[in-house]
Image: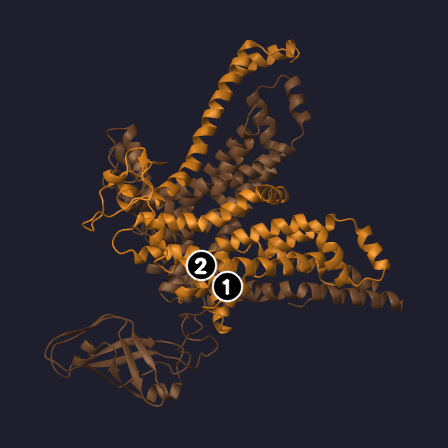
Chain colours: A brown, B orange
């Protein structure tokens, strides 16, 4: 980024022939850059360059393991295993093979393969380099790979003919163009299905949590703001405290409260003797499905449309609603953020001058009219801010999913943010992960813009 | 009902309330207090019960999770002479329990002490760096004229819009390329300045009267002297708010730490350690230990919160009004 970009007003003035003033200005600019430098360097390295990096990686199939910038090196190829026994041998994915030669190179198989029974039978297994010590193209081809790390397996197989490398160059990663984007958006693929499952879950999460927390926060703020209320400070503290607590800690507490024999079920059971314990943390059933089920509506009875697939998911599954487990995490999220939102609303409420209400009272407006026609419109900018905060927070829900459910049961708590992590760091598919993250960025941006238009129109009305 | 009373109120000129309205008001206030107390209970009871259960033996955390009144005998043994776990009924009833320290002893059998120290290191280092970097940058943006001033401000502001999840992968790459993965420096440097802090400091410096600096300038003080001797001491309220937000944010940081030090358990912070502790418990979670960990993780922040509550609340409302 060029610091002197653009024409700042100061630049025009410095053309004046007054040297002392010019010197002074140059001095000031220099000081300013010195002042800015530390923060700018941090921003540049950890925020701005990474954004462009994310875009670059989204056009590759980088695995996150081989070093970037070493495209010609590295290895993704095949190993040939030979059976030494009369029995069928399974070679599990993740079997490590050490090479012997000029450089130690380790390779890991990436698929489960079974070698047929019989001495001398061979099978080709796709493999990739295990660590950063990739070596050069030439020694990958030349060296004979011999020993398998698992001793039990090493006894029954031998590895010969190392890594016939496909393509030779660009094996660590390749520029794949828009492949990651089409995988998610256009093709019928596992990646697409997972993405839309995640998107569905995330949207249910957002649509459930954001309105609920906004309305509840406003309601509570209005109550706490009442003149006759005592112990305001206590209530403010009580509501705000959860939002300063670590999301991981809150997730642990909720996991404990929502276990099958736990606090929540005990409490509900005490109030309703007929209550059957809900398995909050492991129930993939959608709440809308459950609700429809009360009226005997099920997938088989609603007609053929339910089996139609859109983006790899049946229409019936699209309308599932959040699963019970996701609902639990939605409750957790609302519970945590309500306090922040309430404090923001409270500050805005206290900024509304008392005369406004007095005028309304003289005009004979009822409490509800005052709230509806005066308080809510005056709070519109605050509502915009609260909803934006809510959208950004809920669209990225990650910590709670990581701790509580890891995306399960049956992928019903898989969110887009969690999918980014899983693809990148569990499945070693950084390209797909970066693509997913960027698509999420665009979605959040669009949602924020839409709600901006909405709030602005409401304000104009 | 409200429209009728509205007309009546206009006739009686607002000074005297009609009985209907007064009744309505009473119903409203009773309902309002009810709602408020219900929510306050829902927000506070989980913490109260977490503390209570962290001081229980294991069986009562499952069978009597709701009991919260500690009664003597204190500091009971959770195992009996035969070496087996005492049943829940031995140490708890529906409302009371005998406190034990098993949870707190248990949590330190993991790497918990190390994570606690790491958390302090991360939070302090990041906070100190942010105080310096953010206030320097905030001052330059607020007070100094230089080409690119506005552009830089908008770029910094713009980065606030970037979702953290988008940075997850590229940050990992950068740190990997720099050889900073699995190191203290990796965590600390990547969090060493933040847009919110710069914004906060800039707004504050703009509110300080310029005359004070002018006077110092006449005396021939350099910008640096002026900044450190005169301007910064005046910025104590903003610096306090920044300290609190940075400390809280870093203390609770989970995602960045997860990505950066994932491979070295000795560098975990408390949230990461707590999140991954599940896997170390075996088949079932040992709740008194886990909840003790939750209490210790929260305690330092809770102390800071109750000491500086005003700044927390002011800071959040401040950012809210700007939005």
Question: Could you say whether the residue bearing mark 1 is in a helix, strand or loop?
Answer: helix
Q: Can you say whether A273 is above or below A115 in the image?
A: above
- The residue carrying mark 1 is B187
Residue located farthest toward the right when viewing the structure as drawn: A18
Residue nearest the viewer, comparing A168 with B141: B141
**Residue at position x 41%, y 65% from top?**
B266
**Residue at position x 74%, y 55% from top?**
B231
The mark closer to the camera, 2 or 1, is: 2
Q: Are marks 2 and 1 in contact (CB under 8 Å)?
A: yes
Where does residue A135 sit, x and y in percent of width and height?
40, 84
Where does residue A232 sit, x and y in percent of width and height?
55, 31
Residue B269 badge: 2
Residue nearest the viewer, comparing B215 with A203: B215
Q: Quadrant of residue A187?
A: bottom left
Query: Along the polypeptide, which appears first: circle 2 or circle 1?
Result: 1
Q: Chain of mark 1?
A: B
Q: Chain of mark 2?
A: B
Where does residue B204 sit, x and y in percent of width and height?
69, 49
Q: Quadrant of the N terminus of chain A?
A: bottom right
């Amino acid at each position: 980024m060029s610091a002197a970009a653009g024409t700042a007003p100061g630049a025009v003035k410095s053309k004046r022939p007054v040297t002392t003033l010019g010197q002074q200005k140059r001095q000031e600019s220099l000081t300013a850059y010195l002042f800015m430098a530390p923060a700018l360097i941090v921003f540049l390295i950890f925020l701005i360059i990474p954004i462009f990096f994310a875009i670059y990686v989204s056009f590759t199939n980088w695995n996150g393991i081989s070093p970037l910038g070493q495209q010609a090196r590295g290895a993704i190829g095949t190993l040939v295993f030979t059976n030494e026994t009369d029995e069928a041998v399974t070679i599990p994915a993740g079997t490590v093979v050490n090479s012997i030669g000029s450089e130690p190179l380790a390779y890991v198989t990436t698929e489960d393969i079974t070698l047929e029974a019989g001495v001398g039978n061979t099978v080709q297994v796709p493999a990739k380099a295990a660590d950063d010590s990739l070596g050069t193209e030439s020694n990958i081809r030349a060296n004979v790979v011999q020993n398998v790390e698992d001793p039990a397996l090493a006894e029954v197989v031998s590895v010969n003919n190392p890594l016939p490398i496909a393509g030779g160059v660009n094996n660590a990663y390749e520029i794949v163009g828009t492949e990651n984007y089409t995988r998610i958006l256009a093709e019928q693929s596992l990646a697409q299905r997972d993405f839309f499952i995640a998107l569905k879950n995330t949207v249910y999460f957002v649509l459930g949590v954001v309105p609920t927390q906004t309305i509840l926060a406003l309601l509570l703020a209005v109550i706490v703001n009442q003149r006759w209320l005592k112990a305001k400070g206590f209530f403010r503290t009580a509501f705000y405290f959860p939002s300063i607590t670590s999301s991981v800690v809150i997730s642990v507490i909720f996991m404990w409260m929502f276990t099958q024999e736990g606090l929540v079920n005990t409490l509900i059971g005490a109030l309703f003797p007929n209550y059957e314990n809900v398995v909050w943390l492991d129930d993939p059933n959608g709440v809308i499905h459950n609700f429809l089920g009360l009226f005997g509506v099920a997938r088989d009875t609603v007609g053929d449309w339910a089996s139609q697939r859109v983006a790899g998911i049946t229409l019936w599954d699209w309308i599932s609603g959040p699963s019970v487990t996701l609902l639990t995490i939605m409750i957790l999220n609302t519970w945590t953020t309500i306090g922040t939102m309430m404090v923001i609303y409270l500050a805005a409420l206290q900024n509304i001058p008392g005369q406004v209400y007095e005028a309304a009272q003289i005009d004979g407006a009822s409490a509800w009219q005052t709230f509806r026609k005066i308080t809510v419109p005056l709070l519109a900018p605050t509502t915009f801010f609260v909803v934006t905060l809510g959208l950004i927070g809920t669209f990225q829900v990650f910590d709670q999913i990581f701790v509580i459910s890891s995306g399960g049961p049956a992928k019903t708590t898989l969110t887009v943010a969690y999918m980014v992590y899983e693809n990148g760091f569990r499945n070693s598919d950084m390209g797909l992960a970066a693509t997913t993250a960027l698509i999420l960025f665009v979605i959040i941006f669009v949602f924020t813009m839409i709600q901006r238009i909405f709030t602005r129109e409401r304000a104009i009305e | 009902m409200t429209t009728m009373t509205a007309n009546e109120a206009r006739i009686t000129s607002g000074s005297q309330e009609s009985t209907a309205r007064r009744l309505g008001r009473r119903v409203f206030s009773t309902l309002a207090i009810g709602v408020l107390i219900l929510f306050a209970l829902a927000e506070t009871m989980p913490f109260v019960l977490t503390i209570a259960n962290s001081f229980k033996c294991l069986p009562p955390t499952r069978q009597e999770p709701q009991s919260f009144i500690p009664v003597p005998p204190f500091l009971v043994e959770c195992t009996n002479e035969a070496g087996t776990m005492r049943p829940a009924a031995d140490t708890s009833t529906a409302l009371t329990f005998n406190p034990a320290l098993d949870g707190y002893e248990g949590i330190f059998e993991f790497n918990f002490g190390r994570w606690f120290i790491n958390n302090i290191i991360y939070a302090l280092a990041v906070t100190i760096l942010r105080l310096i970097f953010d206030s320097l940058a905030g001052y330059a943006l607020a007070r100094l004229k230089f080409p690119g001033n506005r552009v830089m401000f908008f770029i910094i502001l713009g980065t606030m819009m970037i979702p953290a999840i988008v940075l997850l992968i590229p940050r990992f790459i950068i740190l990997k390329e720099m050889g900073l993965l699995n190191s203290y420096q990796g965590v600390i440097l990547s969090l060493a300045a933040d847009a919110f802090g710069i914004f906060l400091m800039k707004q504050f410096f703009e509110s300080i009267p310029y005359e004070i600096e002018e006077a110092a300038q006449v005396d021939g003080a350099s910008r640096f002297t002026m900044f450190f001797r005169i301007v910064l001491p005046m910025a104590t309220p903003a610096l306090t708010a920044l300290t609190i937000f940075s400390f809280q944010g870093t203390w609770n940081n989970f995602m960045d730490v997860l990505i950066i030090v994932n491979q070295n358990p000795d560098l975990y912070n408390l949230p990461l350690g707590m999140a991954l502790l599940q896997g170390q418990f075996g088949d079932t979670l040992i709740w008194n230990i886990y909840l003790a960990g939750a209490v210790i993780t929260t305690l330092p922040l809770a102390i800071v919160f109750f000491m500086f509550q005003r700044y927390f609340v002011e800071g959040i409302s401040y950012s809210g009004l700007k939005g």
